[in-house]
Image (spheres, rainbow, N blue to C red):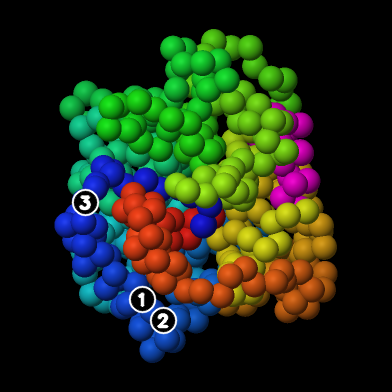
Amino acid sequence: MLSAVRRPAALVAGVLTATALLGAAAPSFADASASASAAPLPTALYGKGDPTYDGVWRQSLSLIALHAQGVTPAADATDWLAKQQCSDGGWSSYNADASKPCVPATEDTNATSVAIQALVALGGHDDAVAKAVAWYKNVQNKDGGWSYNPGTASDANSTSLVVSALAAAKVDPASVAKDGKSAVQGLAAFQLGCSTPAAQQGAYAYQPDKSGKLAANGLASAQGAIGAEQAFLPVVASAASAASSASCGDSAASAANYLAAQLKGGQEHLTQQLAGAAPSPDYAATAWAVLALAHQGRVSDAQGAMAWLKQNAQAWTQGDHGQPQPSALALLVLAAQATGTDATQFGTTNLVAQLESTGPAPAATPGTHGASAAASSSATAAPKQGGTGNIVVFIALLIAGVGVGLLVSSWNRKRLGKRA
């Protein structure tokens, strides 16, 4: 999902800290590259790219999206996801050898969320879901929220995704608390409220800065809105409703109002901005915003964004190397379904066929999805964007002095795939 700006829990400075971060993180990239080239990917996995940071994420989104379209995914695809669950109930981003125990500190609240939502949608995995909910309760932070990996500061995106998973599992998020702070309160702490300028009210920050100030973030706002609504995937549109004039204290309504205003004022898409760079389109955040608005019954406010995604998202769905990206395709399928858009005729792209083509053949389909997936993929593939390996770019940015904060954010964005 390379559209998520993930800030570290605490931005650090200084050469020694940067060196330490490189020493801790660089081997992960080296190992990932080596494993990706040396070991074949599981045949049950969706996508051909390195799954180190998004294997469970993309698998789960793919299963949810295909199932929502009436496709019965291959049994081994679902089994693979179920077997990735750690013994304590969580999921790691990817476990190359599921027979080996997970490392608790690297378990992934985001991956666990979409895994829960996938298993709930597919049915028949109540024990696994209950075990995952218990894990969430064990790793909840004292502020009521969750971090990407256990043991670090809470963030809005992770907390929102956990709230959605709890709702999917039919567990009231308000009842899941640590030290008197519930999941609902944990998420609300990241929302810009009535004391902020009107244009910012309803937005979510990823995390507060060092002074405790909250700054609006596109992806955090889109995912935060879904959490505030206690919605989960696949999102079902509510009855049509107009823009709400509810108090800025109404978390869900004010979040939807903020997203609608941002889309309308931003040429129907959300943006992201890395340090030292100009703002660029954030495809994933835009798709999540569509889902949030649809669940609020405001499909009309999301139609412009859907039209923009139809026209502009092809390069995003093909990734840097021209390979179909299952998480991006799945997210667009879900956004299309939530807004009543035909995912098999998404501009010139058959999203469902392309998504099917990235993984094992489905057990059953509701019918022919048009042209072959291979032809569809070839016809809609966009030119490759940039030919330099991500790690080279990251190290160059650090050397150039862009800063360790940007470097860590970029690594986190890599982990998220992001994650569409």
Residue occupying the point 69% across, 20% down: 243
**How far is the residue under mark 2 from the one under mark 1?**
6 Å
Above-or-below relation of 103 to 387 = above
Q: How many marks?
A: 3
Question: In the figure, residue 103 lies in which quadrant?
Answer: bottom left
Q: Position of residue 341 (x, y in %)?
A: 77, 48
Residue 117 part of the magenta segment: no
What is the chief secondary structure element of the magenta stretch?
A: helix
**How far is the residue under mark 3 from the one under mark 1?**
27 Å
Check disc 3 and report the residue beneath it.
14
What secondary structure is found at the residue carrying circle 2? helix
Q: Are marks 3 and 2 in contact (CB under 8 Å)?
A: no
Q: Specify the farthest residue to the front.
A: 400
Q: Specify the farthest residue to the bottom.
A: 38
Residue occupying the point 25% across, 64% down: 22
**How far is the residue under mark 3 from the one under mark 2?**
33 Å
Q: Residues within 10 Å of mark 3 (few under 14, many from 20)?
A: few
Q: Position of residue 418 (x, y in %)?
A: 49, 56
**Res 182 visible:** no
Question: In the figure, residue 239 lies in which quadrant?
Answer: top right
Q: Which residues are magenta?
A: 294-310
Q: Earlier in the sequence, mark 3 or mark 2?
A: 3
What quarter of the picture does the C terminus occupy? bottom right
Above-or-below relation of 415 to 242 = below
Check disc 1 and report the residue beneath it.
32
Q: Residues within 10 Å of mark 2 (few under 14, many from 20)?
A: some
Check disc 2 and report the residue beneath it.
36
